[in-house]
Image: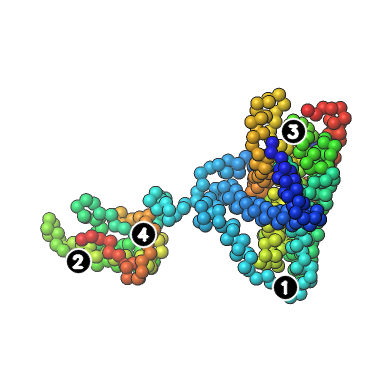
Amino acid sequence: MFDFSVVTNWIHAQLTAVMPVGLAVFLECVVIGICLLLMYVVVAIIMIYMERKVCAAFQCRLGPNRVGPAGTVQVICDVFKMLTKEIIIIRHADKFLYNLAPYIVIIASVLAFSCIPINKGMEILDFNVGVLFLIAASSIGVVGILLAGWSSNNKYSLIGAMRSGAQMISYELSIGLSILTIVVLTDTMQFSEIVERQADGWFIFKGHIPALIAFIIYLIAGNAEVNRGPFDLPEAESELTAGYHTEYSGMHFGLFYVAEFVNLFIISAIAATIFLGGWMPLHIPGLDGFNTVMDYIPGFVWFFGKAFFVVLLLMWIKWTFPRLRIDQILTLEWKYLVPIGLVNLLLMVVVVVFKLHF
Amino acid sequence: MSNYIKGLFHGLGTLLTGMKVTGKEFFTKKVTEKYPENRATLKMFDRYCGELVMPHDENGNNKCIGCGLCSMACPNGTIRITTENVTDPETGRPKRRLVKYEYDLGSCMFCHLCVNACPHDAIEFSTNFEHAVFTREKLVKTLNKQ
C-alpha cells in the first residue's frame, strides 16, 4: 500500500532545508489550499456530469452528448457561462447578508471536504475528534441557507429556507446517531484511525446487523441533509420556483449549485469511509494471496470507486421517489429514523460489549 | 405498535419495488436518436406523416382517377388537380383523366384527411421528413409522373 506521507515528508524536508520552518509551513498550507480548491472544483464538475448522465439513464435518455465526446465538455462550458453572467442585487435585499450567504455555504462545504481521507497518508485535516469536527463544519451550511432565504426579501426564498432549516437540523440527529454507532464499534473519532481499523474487513461486514441498519439510516438522512432526492423541499421547483436561491444569479447561484453537488459527494465519501473502508482495499481474512492482489490497486482508486458507488445509490433514490410533504419528512425523522437509530445504537453497544462482532 | 412495525416493513417493500422499476430502466436501451449521425440507419415509425406521395407501379402508372375528392377534403387547399376529358377507346364514353397533381407542402398540415378521402388509395404519406429548401416555390410538388 503506497503511503502518501512519504511524498509530503520529502517536500517538507526539501523546504525546511532552504527556509525557516514557519515560512515552509505557510507555503505548504497555501499549496494544500490551492490543491483542495482545485479538487473541489474537479469533483463538482464530475458530479454534475454524472448527475446529468445518471438522471438521463434512469429516464431512458442519453443525456448530454453534443459538446465534446459523450458530452464531457458540456459541464465545463456551463461553468464558464455561469462565470460570465451578471450578479444581480435585489433592490430591497439585505445586501451584506445577501452577498455573504453563498460564501458561508461554500466554506462549510470546503471545511467538510477537507476532512476526508483520500489515500494512506493523504488526509488534510486529521485529528482525534475528526468526526465531531466534520459534523460541526457541515452543519454551518444551514446558516448560509437560512441567511440566503431571509436576505432575499422574497416569500418563496423564505419558505424554502425555513423548510430547509427544519429539515437539516432534524436530520443532523440521525446522521450523528448512525455515525456514533460506528464510533462505538471503533472507539476512535479520528478518520485515519477509523480507516486503519478496517484493514481486516470493512465495518459494514464487521458490525453486521447494526452497521447495516446504521448505513441505511445514514444514506436516508444524508440525502435529506443535502436537500436532494425525495427530500428537496427547500427548492421544490413546482411550489417555490427554486427555494432559497431563487433570487441569486451568476456565480452566486453557481456557488450554491456547486456546494449542493459537492455536499452530496462528501456525504457519500463519509459513508464510504466509515462503512465501506475508505481507501482500504477489500481484505478477506485468511485469503492472503487475494489480499496482496487487492493491495496493488492504489488507495485513492478504492476511495473514489466506493464514494461514487454511494453517489450512484443516492442518485438512484433521487430519480425514483416522489417528493415528500414537510409533515411527512418530519414524521419520517422523528417517528422512524431517530427511534430506530437509538435502538440500533443500543444494539451496537450490546454487540460490542459481548464481542459479537467479527 | 404492530401497525408501526408492519407499516415500516410495508413501506420499505414498496420503496424497493420502485427502485427495482427504475433499476431496470437504467439498463434498458435508450430511446434518444442521435439524429444527424444516424441518418443512414434512422427508421421513422410507420404512421408518421412526412409528406404526401403518389406511388407508381413499374410501368409508371398511378391509381389516381382525378376525382378531386382529396382536394375537396383538404382544409387548407393544399392540393390542386388539373384534369382533361378523353374518350375511352373501349366503351366510347368520355372519361376524366389526371393531367397534373400539384401538392403544396408549404401549406400542408399533415392531417391525413386527403389519404382518408381517396377511394382508390392512390396517395399516401411517406415518412421522409427532411423538407428544408431555400424558396417557397420549391415546396410545390407535382406528384404524378405522366
Residue B51 circle label? 4
- Relative to A98, is A343 on the left or the right? right
Q: Are both tags, 3 and 1, on one chain?
A: yes
Considering every residue shown, the one lying at the far front of the view is: A18
Residue at x 28%, y 61% (from the top left corner): B143
Mark 3 or mark 1: whose residue is earlier in sequence: 1
Q: Are marks 3 and 2 in contact (CB under 8 Å)?
A: no
Indicate the amino acid at tag 1: Ile
Residue B1 circle label? none
Q: CA distance from mark 1 to mark 4?
A: 52 Å
Provide the chain ID for the residue under circle 2. B
Q: Is residue B139 above or below residue A125?
A: below
Q: Are both tags, 3 and 4, on one chain?
A: no
Position of the C terminus of chain A, as image quadrant, is top right
Residue at x 31%, y 58% (from the top left corner): B53
Q: CA distance from mark 3 to mark 4?
A: 68 Å
Instruction: Examine the image and state in which quarter residue A161 appears.
Output: bottom right
Provide the chain ID for the residue under circle 3. A
Q: CA distance from mark 3 to mark 1?
A: 54 Å
Q: Residue A280's x, y, as percent? A: 71, 37
Q: Are both tags, 1 and 2, on one chain?
A: no
Indicate the amino acid at tag 3: Ala
Mark 2 or mark 4: whose residue is earlier in sequence: 4
Q: Are marks 1 and 2 in contact (CB under 8 Å)?
A: no
Report the mark closest to the observer, 3 or 1: 3
- Relative to A175, is A310 on the left or the right? left
Q: Residue A301's x, y, as percent? A: 65, 41
Residue at x 76%, y 74% (from the top left corner): A92
> According to the image, label 3 marks what residue?
A199
Q: Residue A71's x, y, as percent? A: 54, 54
Considering every residue shown, the one lying at the far bottom of the view is: A91
Residue B84 circle label? 2
